[in-house]
Amino acid sequence: MLFAFVLFSICNVCSQGTEIDSLKNLLKKQGKDSTRVNLNYQLSTAYRNEPDSSLEYIHKGIDLSTYLKLDKKEHQGLNLLAMYWFDRGNTKKSMEVITIALDFIDKASDLEKTKTLDNYGLILHSLSRHDEAAEAHLKALAVSEKNGNSYRAVVSLSNLGNIYRYLDEKNKALEFYNKALAISLKNNYKNYIANSYGNLGIVYRANNEPEKALEVYKKSIEMHREMGEKFHVAIGLMNLGILYESLEKYEDAKKCQLESKKISSQIKDDIGVVLTLNNLAVLEAKTNQYKKAISLLDSAKARAEKIDYKDAYKHIYLAYAETYSRMGNYKAAYENRTYFEKWKDSISNENYLKNISELEAKYETEKKEKEIATLSEQKLKNETLIKEQRQQVKWLGATAMGVVAMSVLVFLLFKQRTKNKRQNELIDAISETQNMERKRIAQDLHDSIGGSLALIKNKLEVASDKENISKQDLLGTIETVSKTSDKVRCISHNLMPSELIKFGLVSGIQSILDQIDKDHINAQLYAHNMEQRIDPTKEIQLYRITQEVIQNVLKHAQAKNLTIYLNKYAKHVSLMLEDDGKGYDHASNGGMGISNIKNRIEQLKGTLDIDSSQGRGTTFNIQIPV
């Protein structure tokens, strides 16, 4: 069984080439204001086929909007960042970012609200949380319809169609896809016309209408190629390959899957790579190339596990089972078939459809209630009908709330079990960090104080043997005692700096930067909304984390500039440290410094995101709840 993929509605079309040069020229002339933030975001979208450059401009836009206290612009950047990680197949990071965006969604514009809700729905759907995803898309659709934003309505309609198609409700999917296509054709939304064609092709293929599917697939791919949308071209080729496979045109199918995989690799779309590896394995098995098929499935499974792409497991295990069955290895075929059934049964389509239908009914009844209210204002006299429909709204609302309450209860029980396990692991990590801290203090005392005290003792013993102690000997001993006292004071300051205790985290970090040789590195601190102090324990831990990162930069980064951003929000503190040094491969780095930083952040129940690569500097992005 080959794995089809729908064209999720997340793209933002922007020309490249000369457009990028033009935006860069404007950026050079622009001061630090909201226009500069917009230019950074436009460049991130223009660079959508060059992931590293795209990420760089997203971070620049977010950092500047945070510095300028532009909440709406910061929210816009978080949406871009969430979808950047989603496109790369990193659902964990995309969920972390979109959760932050949801925390202050009330400060966002209506346009960004719909984007946040739709993006949240996409991430939930990829995590197989389909009823929650549908709820998010329905909320986004309601906001778009309220504000007359037909473009964003198309996005939500397309995504709802994708969920119904995934749950094998083909007629319902066609209903949403055709609504999206009709609005797109009316308003000439080229990117969503192309998306809708691709999505309709999947349904036509499933309904055994290959000629219709082939026609709309080719239209979709051609339009996306013209717009430079590599992500959607890759998806279109993948689905066209599946159609050719169903028609037993295996060479054409392989050609499409290989080109799709190549494009997905170029744009670092790990999910796309997993899907094409699975599809290529099925094709190899059907042409009796069993060793190649198993090797491809091994690669697909390893990548799916790496990015926690659960939705792929059932398709991969089914492909394993069918391949081993063709090979005559019925034991392995049975084992993998069992795994397939386990993953298939772990997601009950029937339950999801029930929940989604109830949510859709709630949305429709709320919409109906508003229509009734409007008619009432126009002196509609049929009060009995209005009361009946309002009663239906209440009944459906209560039913939906009951379903949500049960879902929340099950989720909380599962979350508590996971939390207990993680807490035990964290206790071990805290103990290890404390032991390392004790060893460091002991080493400091031994190296700095122990030697000095031994020297003082030796001088006093020599002096006690003399009949007359010279003034010079006495002054030398006093000087040694004074230096030892200074070392004790220095160690004490490092353990608990007075600036931190008296004046708070901003002063504490600034005191670290004041001690750095300005000729060696230019270090700057930008703080926002830190007038009110946070919990002392968290201040100390954040101070230690900053110390560790700065030490790493000074020792290893060979950087010329270090910038620190410290911002407090309603529910969390954000600490970002960014250098322009040589960078490093943090995936293979196991240094004790990084380990200590991670342990401290875990103690605070925070998150750490390290963005680094050779020659591009390093960014530590730390979020701590308050």
Image: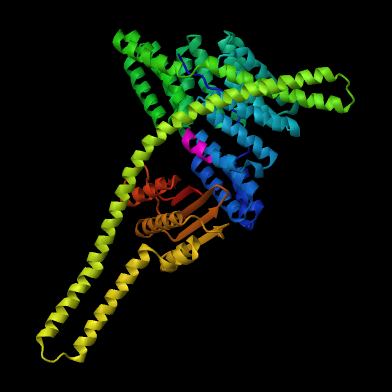
* Placement of 504 over or under 352, stated as above or below: below
Main SS, magenta residues = helix
Left or right: 491 in relation to 271? left
Where does the N terminus fall, quadrant-wise?
Answer: top left
Q: Quadrant of residue 530?
A: bottom right
- Identify which residue is drawn at 68% across, 27% down: 154
- Identify which residue is drawn at 66% across, 31% down: 140
* Placement of 594 over or under 362, stated as above or below: below
Q: Quadrant of residue 362?
A: top right
Q: Quadrant of residue 153?
A: top right
Magenta residues span 88-97
Colour scheme of this structure image?
A: rainbow
Q: Nearer the viewer, residue 487 or 558?
A: 487
Q: Nearer the viewer, residue 329 or 448?
A: 448
Looking at the image, can residue 78 be seen? yes
Magenta run includes residue 92: yes
Magenta run includes residue 319: no
Left or right: 588 in relation to 112? left
- Identify which residue is drawn at 54% across, 60% down: 526
Left or right: 199 in relation to 515? right
* Placement of 583 over or under 134, stated as above or below: below
